[in-house]
Amino acid sequence: MNIKAVLSVLGKDRKGVVATVATTLYECGANIDDIAQTILDDIFSMTMLVTIDEDAGSFNDLQERLLRDGEALGMQIVLQRADVFDFMYKV
């Protein structure tokens, strides 16, 4: 089963952020469908739309790995199911 998810990264700009996140996604069987990033002064912001193949790895496992990546990078990394956004805007 495939799950669409939104991944956001925010923190002080530094080398290796995109590489770290992309490697974790790859290792967990997720695919990057779309990506947007910007740097405002020294603040890095990135949003990705990803597809998670739950046959390769679970949403929860990926979320935990990304939380550890965030701690190692000193950044906030949040993974949310895309259907949460759909429900928020149907109210």
Image (cartoon, rainbow, N blue to C red):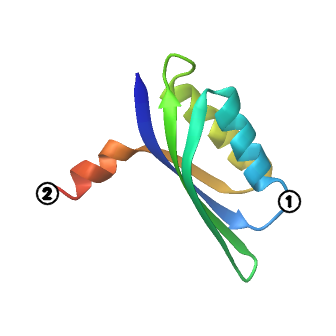
- Pick whichever, 41 or 52, lies toward us: 52
| Residue 36: image location, x then y, percent | 58, 63
Q: Is residue 91 left or right of residue 8?
A: left
Residue 49, compared with residue 26, is above or below; it is below
Q: Residue at x 77, y 68 (%)?
A: 13
Amino acid residing under circle 1: Lys
Q: Residue at the far right: name it.
A: 15
The local crowd at label 1, few if under 14, some if 14 to 19, many if 20 or more residues have their Cα within 10 Å, is few
Q: Which residue is mark 1?
A: 15
Q: Say which amino acid is labelled 2.
A: Val
The image quarter containing residue 41 is bottom right
Residue 32 image position (x, y, % from top left): 58, 44
Q: Looking at the image, is 35 positioned above or below residue 55?
A: below
x and y, in percent, of residue 27 in the image: 70, 28
The residues tagged by marks 1 and 2 sit, at their Cα atoms, a distance apart of: 40 Å
For image coordinates 56% across by 36% down, the residue present is 63
Which quadrant does the N terminus fall into?
Answer: top left
Number of residue marks: 2
Q: Earlier in the sequence, mark 1 or mark 2?
A: 1
> What's the residue at 70%, 43% (across, down)?
22
| Numbered circle sitting on residue 91 | 2
Q: Which quarter of the image is occupied by the C terminus? A: bottom left
The single residue placed furthest to the left in the displayed view is 91
Task: Give the numbered dot on residue 53.
Answer: none
Q: Secondary structure at mark 1?
A: loop
Residue at left offset 23%, top offset 49%: 87
